Amino acid sequence: MTKDNRSRGPDSDTPGTDLKTERDEFLKKFSRGTQLTEDFVKEHERMQHRLQDLESENAGLRAKVEADQAVRELLKKIERLENEKSELVSQYRQAEQATTQFTARVQEVESEFANLANLFVASNQLHSSLSPRGVTRRIKEVLAQLVGAERYAMYLVNPEGEELIPIASEGVPGNQLLPVRIAGTRIGDVLRKGSASVADSDPSQGTFADPPAVIPLSVDDRVVGTIAIFSTLAQKNKFDQVDFELFKLLGQHAAQALVAASLFAQAEQKLPGLEAFLDLSV
Amino acid sequence: MAEYSCLIVEDSPMMRQLLVFALARVKNLRVTEADDGVDGLRKLASAKYDIIVTDINMPIMDGLKLVKRVRTDPVHKDTPIVIITTEGSQEDRQRALQLGANAYITKPIQAPQVIATVKELLKIE
């Protein structure tokens, strides 16, 4: 063994005190570095989690904002649709009202047409015969079929102008079918005044003493007779506007048709010669 | 659009004219007139009709006999028949319905009622 070896101490592998301290220092520092690194890694992980949480939260908030926006848009859309609906409902109501008015007008026109048809047919029928019997039959048909008269009589004034003589009737018993004095009777009054007398009461309940309708019959401006309606059919419980028009038509045309037919019968159905029309100054 | 034909059987010229006027308001309806039941049967034998409107009281052949005859006619046994009666003749009306008439109208006739009855039986809107 050498002197150098002896001066180095008991074990050459055992570090000296300084080295040991240095090593410990180093190990301590290394260990702290490791600790710091670990802490740093942990912190990093924590930060990453936090970032993820924040991103997730952010995404949630974003979604919420978007959802709120969608809700707002939906609300706006609902409002717009509500307005459209109100407008459509209003338009529908207007259309419905127009349809109701149109339907009422169509019914009115149809009814008007039916009334005009009745008047046309009555007028046409009254002048479609040139025999007194034929004209009388048609007058009776107008009364029965168009007016709905059940019991009625037609009178013409006698030449003395004092009495009305029954010339045609329906549903009137013989004992009621008598000449009627012009003075002091309702039927006579109509002849004198020249205007119809129509009661407001139910005409189906009329009586011989109090006929619900009496119509004057005129030829030109002369009143020559009357038609008295004593009662109507059960279902005819009031006179309508068209009945009043029919009364006017009968008043103006029935007697004229009857007079024309009588004159034609008296002339033995001979048409007047051409000379009868030459002085018409047309 | 389908065309329909109607036969009116009525002895009174005035009533016939009224019915023709009323039914002229029904679109695509062709109307033929007959004076009484016999004339009606003659016309039914020569053509096919979609509906018949007939009065009950007629000379020569009345509406009841006509309804009975029409229901035995193979061509018209199912043809709708409308009868025209007076309010008082309830028996005639019942008899006509029993014999096969489909509907009735009472006098004095109202054009809107005639139109509505015919349209209903022909199933026209």
Image (cartoon, coloured by chain):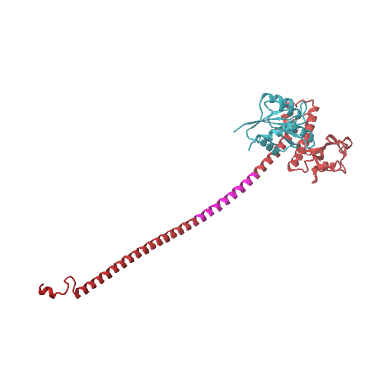
Chain colours: A red, B cyan
Relative to residue A41, is residue A257 drawn left or right? right
Q: Residue furthest right?
A: A175
- As for residue A88 lying within the magenta part, the answer is yes
- As for residue B28 lying within the magenta part, the answer is no
Q: Residue furthest left?
A: A2
Relative image position of residue A30 (x, y in whole percent): 25, 69
Residue shown at the point (23%, 71%) measured from the top left: A26
For the C terminus of chain B, the image quarter is: top right
How many numbered circles are shown? 0
Can residue A259 be seen here?
no
For the N terminus of chain B, the image quarter is: top right
Can residue B22 be seen here?
yes
Q: Quadrant of residue A222?
A: top right
Relative to residue A122, is residue A191 drawn left or right? right
Is A214 in front, or is A260?
A214
Residue shown at the point (72%, 25%) measured from the top left: B39
**Relative to A34, does residue A133 appear above or below in the rendering?**
above
Is A13 in front, or is A229?
A13
Is B16 in front, or is A87?
A87
Q: Name the main secondary structure of what is drawn in magenta.
A: helix
Q: Quadrant of residue A110?
A: top right
Is B100 in front, or is A265?
B100
Q: Which residues are magenta?
A: A76-103
Relative image position of residue B5 (x, y in whole percent): 65, 30
Q: Quadrant of residue B48?
A: top right
Relative image position of residue A184 (x, y in whole percent): 88, 44
**Relative to A97, does residue A53 appear above or below in the rendering?**
below
Relative to residue A191, is residue A40 drawn left or right? left
Relative to residue A193, is residue A33 drawn left or right? left
Relative image position of residue A181 (x, y in whole percent): 88, 40
Residue shown at the point (61%, 48%) measured from the top left: A96
